[in-house]
Amino acid sequence: MRKIIDMRLLPVLAITAIVVVLPYFFPSAYYYRIGALVLIFALAVVGLNLLMGFAGQVSLGHAGFLGIGAYSVAIGPGYFGAPSWLCLFVGAMLSGVVAFLVGRPILRLKGHYLAVATLGFGLLVAIVLTNEAGFTGGPDGMSVPKLVLFGWSARGADAWYWIAGATFIGGFLLALNLMQSPTGRALQAIHDSEIAALVLGVDVARKKLTIFTISAMYASVAGSYLALFNGHITPDVAGFLRSIELVAMVVLGGMGSIVGSLVGAVVLVVLPQALTVFHEYEQALLGLIVMVFMIFLRRGIVPSLATKFAGWRK
């Protein structure tokens, strides 16, 4: 039993060690910023991976929840004088409620019908954030006050690196525990076959709605962190391209792999920064690298490499 518990905690311990040790190799504050962005997006991707990789439900509008969380920490303090930390939790609860209400009808759909329905939700959120200029500042966005906790203000990329790192590790551990619970096993059964899951007595509709709600709350917290970190937010945070980026991170890292969520975020956050030296060829090279990854590592980076490593050991 102790060995099983240790094996389950091994990925968490490994990622915690990486998060703690990595800053010793950062030559400047710029690297703290990139690290913080990786961890923030990885948090959103973990939630989306729970939905796509384990429950088998596609969402092309997940950035809508990112936008709800981001604007919660902007509108709450700006118009109502509420503290940012409280607005962060309110945004997560609001995203959960919206996901619950929206998920009840759209999660009855399957395949590309579900994908289009979630796409419509994401577009709707982006349009509302753009048009309601009185509250959101319209296309120009709005400023976001600093996060203040017990008199301490979160300033600088280094502070946000540690905040995002601690939150990601907590979200990572929560996701692992969820997947190893009866709910997680039910979700994997749904992923394999909804009909078989129904025959086994799984409440498919309830389980899908539960994971959709949890996934939305992950995205909301990540959106709040992104807004507080940047100090300014625009409706682009909830745009279609942002949703596609999140899905690409899930697929690249590996669907059904929680560790893959972090790897996918690393690839799509770090690579564009590293390729800026190629100037006008940056986007072309990024697309080519992503294509190569998907051609040779079809199941995603982490699952494919894990399978190859297991084959080498034999």
Image (cartoon, rainbow, N blue to C red):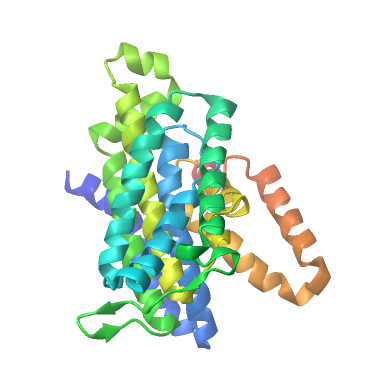
x then y, percent, for residue 252? 58, 49
x then y, percent, for residue 157? 44, 81
x then y, percent, for residue 290? 69, 53
Q: Is residue 116 above or below residue 273?
A: above
Q: Residue at x 52, y 67 (%)?
A: 137
Q: Quadrant of residue 166?
A: bottom left
Say which quadrant the N terminus sits in: top left
Taking the image as shown, residue 195 lies to the left or right of residue 294, namely: left
Q: Is residue 205 above or below residue 253?
A: above
Q: Residue at x 33, y 57 (%)?
A: 91
Residue at the limit of the structure toward the bottom, as seen here: 28
Question: Which of the pair 47/267 is nearer the observer?
Answer: 47
Q: Quadrant of residue 212?
A: top left
Q: Is residue 114 above or below residue 86?
A: above
Taking the image as shown, residue 277 lies to the left or right of residue 142, namely: right
Q: Residue at x 38, y 78 (%)?
A: 145
